[in-house]
Amino acid sequence: MLNFDAVIFDMDGVITKTAKVHSTAWKKMFDEYLHQRERTYHELFSEFTHADDYLPFVDGRPRYKGVEAFLKSRRINIPFGKPEDEPGTETICGLGNSKDKYFNQIVETSGVGVYISTIGLINELLSKGVKVGVATSSKNCELILKKAKINNLFETRVDGVVSAQMGLKGKPEPDIFTTAASNLKVEPRRAIVVEDAISGVQAGFKGNFGLVIGVARENNAHELKANGADVVVADLSEITVDKMNQLIQSKLGR
């Protein structure tokens, strides 16, 4: 008898090898903008880095929230603008749309890779009657899953497009995960969240999920554990359905 009925996976860095693509696109966009500010406002250029900027301010957040958080960290104030702002417009939305343009260019050129261990775990879950969903801040989720030919594996998809339509709060709030659980007709306490971002494990913790599994692909096991992950692995090859069941059982004190 399983102690859980569903598993909800984040996409970038958990299912697909797109976290690095996002990081590359963010760096290209922000470095270009910071160089522009150097030329226009004579500000000293300081590059956007993966460790100091992407991971703490951008990773896992909705796109415009990521722009906002990073700019705030640099004490840069620009108008929010509108979601339809053209890429390159000096607004939060304009910068976010530039990042999205660069991301799509890389995906079109290089395609989408998947983590074989994650797909193996998902197939094992499905074979045992466990419901599977995907919850992500990405507005490109549907496109990426189709390009990777894995969109048929998920019973529900709650992504950036759905979040905008429903007015859901982004990570670290639990809205996308609790909505996915609701779509699967499962109580959060009977569901597992699998995440690689600090904001994601925070969301799983806030949502009172039965178990939050952190995937430490950034040598950030300590940070994931400190922010809400019940268990942290380097890769999902370390996890099986039986292991998940044991972890929940242990957490429940049974």
Image (cartoon, rainbow, N blue to C red):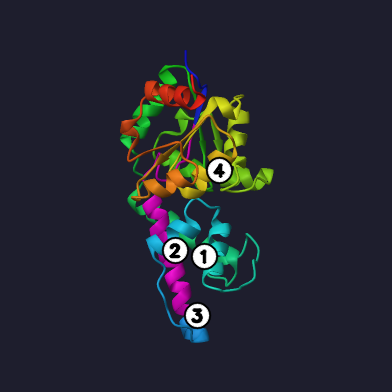
Amino acid carrying mark 1 in the image: Phe
The image quadrant of residue 124 is: top left
Count of numbered circles on the image: 4
Estimate the spatial distance between the alpha carbons at disc 4 and disc 3, rounded to whole Å: 34 Å
Question: Can you give x and y, in whole percent of width and height, for residue 102 in the image?
Answer: 44, 60
| Front label number (1 vs 4) | 4
Mark 3 sits on what residue? 37
Q: Secondary structure at mark 2?
A: helix
Give the magenta-colored segment's residue range.
8-36
Q: Residue furthest top?
A: 1
**Relative depth, front residue between 240 and 150:** 240
- Disc marking residue 70: 1
* Residue 16 shown in magenta: yes
What label sits on residue 203 in the rendered view? 4
Would residue 183 be found to the left or right of residue 226 on screen?
right
Instruction: Give the residue pinned by disc 2.
Output: 53
In front: 161, or 79? 79
Looking at marks 3 and 2 on the same chain, the residue that comes earlier in the sequence is marked by 3
Secondary structure at badge 1 equals helix
Which amino acid does the dot numbered 2 rest on? Asp
Per the model, the C-alpha gap separating discs 1 and 3 is 15 Å
